[in-house]
Image: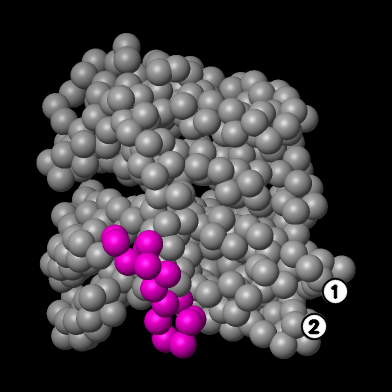
Amino acid sequence: MTLMLTSFITMYTAYNTNEQLSARTAVIGTAITGLLALSCTDIQYSGFTFYNDWFRFTSSNTPIITIMLFTMILLVAYLTVNHRYTMPAPWLIGLITINGIGLMLLPAVNDLLITYMVIELQSYSLYTITGVYNKSYNATRGAMTYFLTGGIASIAITVASVYIYKYTGTTNLYDLSMMYEYSKDSLINPMYMLTGALMFKMGLAPLHAWSIAVYNYAPTIVTAYISIVAKVAISGWLFANANTLGPYVLYMVFYISLMTAAIMPLYQVNIKTMLAYSGMTNFGYLLLPILLQDPSYYIYTMQYVITHMVIFICLLATNEYMMKPNTRWSPMVLVNELMMPNRIMALSLIMCLLSLMGMPPLPGFYGKFSIITGLMDAGLSLPVLSIMLFSVMATYYYAFIIKQLSLSLYMTPVMPQGSKVVGLMLGMLMTFLLTYYITVPFLLEGLTMMSY
C-alpha cells in the first residue's frame, strides 16, 4: 500500500507542484496503510515470513512498525497547510513516503543482506530529504555531511556482513541467533563491528559529532523528521535481533552517550543542538532495555516520540510570531529567541521539557521508571545509578530552556496565529501525554500478552 502511495505521489509531483495536496494524500494513504496493518495483527503470532524468509513479522517488531506509521502521519500532517515561512519543496512528500517504506521494513528484516539494502533505502532518502531545500547553503552542507558519514557506516555494515557469512555460511538472522549461542568466539568480532556501525548510524557517542552538525544545519522541519525516524527504526531492528548483538559495545556506547549528552549541552545556546543531545540521552537510555529485550523499550519509545513531536510542533508554530527570523529555513535558532506570546504553546513546551526531566505524573517519569525497574530486575545496579546521575545533570539545561519559556507567560497575549490543523495536532498530542499515566497499565498488560 505504501509502495502504491509512493508511486502515485511521485507521478503527481512530476506534473503538479501543490505540496499541500501531496501531503494530504500521503496522510490519507498512510492512515489507510495503518488500518490495513491493524486488521492483520494476528500474523505476528503465526511466524509468517515472505520473500524467501527475508522479512518476518513477530510480536517484537509489530509495535515499532506501528509507531513508525504514527510518526509519519504526524510529521506529514504539519505540511498539509501553508505556513508563514514555508519554502517550496515539491519532492519532499514523495521522498518521505519512499523513506517510510524503508522505515517500516527495517524492524521486520530477517536477513543481513536485506538489512543493508533496507538501511540504504531509508538512508539515501534521508540524505536527499536533508538537502531538499537546496537554496540553503547549510542544508546542502548538512546533506553532504550526512552522506559521507553514513557511507562510512554502510561500509562497516557490509564488511561485518561479509565476515559473518564467511564464518557461518548464512545471512539469515534467525539462524544466526541460534548459531551465536554456540559459536560466539568466531562471530564476536564481526557482530561487534555490525553493532558499532549501527550505533554510528544512530549518531550515538562517541561517533556522534556528525549528527549534531547535520541536525543543526538542516531546516527545522527537516530536523524534526530526521532526528527521530532513523533512530527509532534502527533501534527497532536492534531490539528484534538483540540475541545477535555485541553486548560490550552497547554497554560502552550507553555510558559514553549518557556522559556526553549530559555535559556537552551545558555549554550550548543553540536550541536544535541541545535537542540533538537530548535525543542522544534518551536513546542512550534504551540501549540496555534493547539488550535485555525488556518491554520498557516500548513504553519509553512511545512517550519519547510523542514528546519529540510536540516540542518540534511548538517550535515550528512559534515561527508564526517571529518578526526577525534568522533564516527562512530555521527562523528560530537560539534559546533566547524562545519568546512565545501564545501561552498554550509555552505551557505545552514547558510540560514536554518537564517530562524529559522525568517529573511525575508526566510520561517521561513512567518511561524512566519502567527502564529502571527492568534493569533492577536484571541485577544491573551500576547502569541504574548512571541513569539517575546523568538525568540529574541533564536537568540543568532543560531548566535553562524552561526559565526562558517562563518569561513568555508574562508577555501580553496576542491572537493565535497559524493553522487550525497545528492546533488540533497539538491538542490531541497533549491530551495523550497528560493521560499517559492512565494508559501505561493497559500498555504493559498488552505488551506482556504479546510476549507470550
Q: In the displayed structure, would residue 173 be above or below residue 300?
A: below
Residue 332 visible in rendering: no
Magenta stretch: give its range.
Answer: 41-55
What is the quadrant of residue 337 in the picture? top left
User: Along the polypeptide, which appears first: circle 1 or circle 2?
Assistant: 2
Q: Quick one: quadrant of the N terminus? A: bottom left
Residue 159 screen position, x and y as percent:
74, 81
State yes or no: residue 52 in magenta.
yes
SS of the residue at dot 1? helix
Q: Which residue is mark 2?
A: 167
Q: Which residue is mark 1?
A: 186
Q: Residue at x 18, y 23 (%)?
A: 414
Residue 254 screen position, x and y as percent:
71, 44
For badge 2, the amino acid type reads Tyr
Q: Nearest the camera: 407 or 223?
A: 223
Q: Nearest the camera: 386 or 313?
A: 386
- 390 relative position to 216: left or right: right
CB contact under 8 Å: marks 1 and 2: yes
- 222 relative position to 239: left or right: left
SS of the residue at dot 2? helix
